[in-house]
Amino acid sequence: GGLGSMWGIHRSAMRSAGSAAPRRLLSTGIKKQYPVLRIPEHGQDLVRNPLFSKGTAFKMSERDRLGIRGLLPPKVVPMEMQLENELTNIRKLNDPLMKNLALQDLQDRNETLFHRLLIDNINELAPIVYTPTVGKVCQHFGDNFRRGRGMYFSSKDKGEMAAMTYNWRARDIQIIVVTDGSRILGLGDLGANGMGIPIGKLALYCACGGIAPHRVLPVTLDLGTDNLDLLNHPSYLGVQHRRLQGPEYFELLQEFMDAVRARWPKALVQFEDFSSDKAQPILDMYRQDYLCFNDDVQGTGAAVLAGIMGMLRVKGKGPEALLEEKVIMCGAGSAGMGILKQLLDAMEEHGVDRKTAAERLFLVDYTGAVGKTGSGDELKDMVASGKEALDGKPLAQVIDAVKPTLLIGCTGKGGLFDEEVVTKMAAGCERPAIFSLSNPTANSECTAEEAYVWTQGKAIFAAGSPMPEVVLEGKRLIPSQCNNMYIFPGVGLGASLAGSKRVTDRMFIKAAEAVSACLSEQELADGRVFPELHTIREVSKAVGIAVYECALEEGVATVYPRERETVPENVNRRFYDPTYVTLARDDK
């Protein structure tokens, strides 16, 4: 990003915040080395504004010209020391939920410091900001509510949503993450408490995906809940009626989408944690005419595809070897079906028709193997076609019959991959790949230790949540985390920077390929199928570049790099980097 990119970031922050745009940015002699941002905020308003506040890092000269001398302790504390102090305080807390609350407090005080802390300690803090801790954050959202962040559109707001968008002062929103709270992780319907998901996702967008914090908006579409505990709970903050269904639901959803388009026509909308019965229909309704995608359907599918391509690289093979894999998908919800679609798309990209590709894919749901057609679901019927002999058989028998190379779990059923299942995988395959993806950790189909022990260390393993390394017979085995954060920040970055008219299926294939290409030789030797988390910003840049280039190739981009500028240079220039810049007062 560099300081040059920060000029544009902070200038647009001023416009987005609804204030008069600064008249000019000054350079103090050396080009792009000492940017000065002129802002109208001063005094107590500045100290309380998390977008521009530096806390105790304001220099004395800034304190004088911005009218804040005496409003802060006299010592000037550099960012490095602030980061050290914040991290020390967080590490004093033992409960991950309390750590999350401490980070929320920091974000409400100083956005720049929050995102710098998250970037510099991503391995340690990502599980606190998002999975698995975010599940507890949502469960206790009402009890721990301190300060509003984002917007809530509810069933009480019919006819008012377009006007409501102007209550959010930012004029240039780049990314919106919206949930209706109907299927939060593996925890079910949490209603308005699901707001923790968009907030957590957007923290990762800013820290990992290079989107500036003034350009993001978390949203909850609160159309009721079917969670009886919440309907009767005094501290529940959402509307307390049964969840709307049918035309009532979709009418309000349409009003929300129209309101967003009218207020922020260039914003990308990411649908998050909608129930399985609505996720795909909603995506199908809007994907051609709106810049949007569903992270559970498309993001999860692309993340798993990236892991599979990484698995092929561990085996010394290229992406074309995907056609040789036999895959059992356990779970027919939005995530599972999204993964199957992504696999079919990728196989088709490598020259195999979908019907032939589907012969190598097998679906198991709560009733057993799916081998009958006529469900009314085109994708499910395509995968089931020709597999009548397997219909209804339990997972272990399907493994015996199919001898798969890859087993994927998206069921939310902890322990589904028991010793019998895993040992059968190892018996039929030299390097069985086991992706146990359900969140939170308690819902994971098996643990890394179980997978490694039951396969005598032969398994290539990935999980949805972080799991510790395993030492088996003196050998260090390192599980990977198959996390959507490798995909969605870069997809949102690339699509929004390109001004894409839509998010295409091919963008997700290119995103997955970009992630697997980031694996180093050492990571492959360690058996990792995803790059180490501390490289996530470079991974997101690579994904963003691949998506931007895909938008150009497919003719859906509306924003082009400058003359004599490459796409990578364009993305690097516009990539957010949280650092303090010098502030000066602008009264006009």
Image (cartoon, helix red, strand yellow):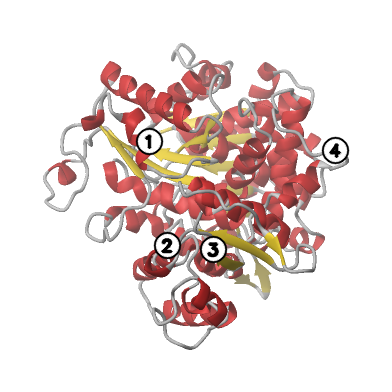
Q: In screen coordinates, is 539 left or right of 170?
A: right
Amino acid type at circle 2 is: Asn
Binning the other alpha carbons within 10 Å of mark 2 as few (below 14), some (14 to 19) or many (20 upward) gives some
Residue at the location (81% across, 60% down)? 521
Residue at the location (52% across, 84% down)? 76
Which residue is tagged 4? Answer: 563
Check disc 4 and report its element: helix, strand or loop: loop
Amino acid type at circle 3 is: His
Q: In screen coordinates, is 282 left or right of 425?
A: left
- Note whether residue 158 is visible: yes
> Between tags 3 and 2, which lies in front?
2
**Are circles 1 and 4 on residues that touch, CB within 8 Å?**
no
Binning the other alpha carbons within 10 Å of mark 4 as few (below 14), some (14 to 19) or many (20 upward) gives few
Which residue is tagged 1? Answer: 165
**Are circles 2 and 1 on residues that touch, CB within 8 Å?**
no
Disc 1 and disc 3: Cα gap in Å?
Answer: 26 Å
Spot occupied by residue 568 in the image (x, y as percentages of width and height):
79, 46
Disc 3 and disc 2: Cα gap in Å?
Answer: 15 Å
Which residue is tagged 2? Answer: 49
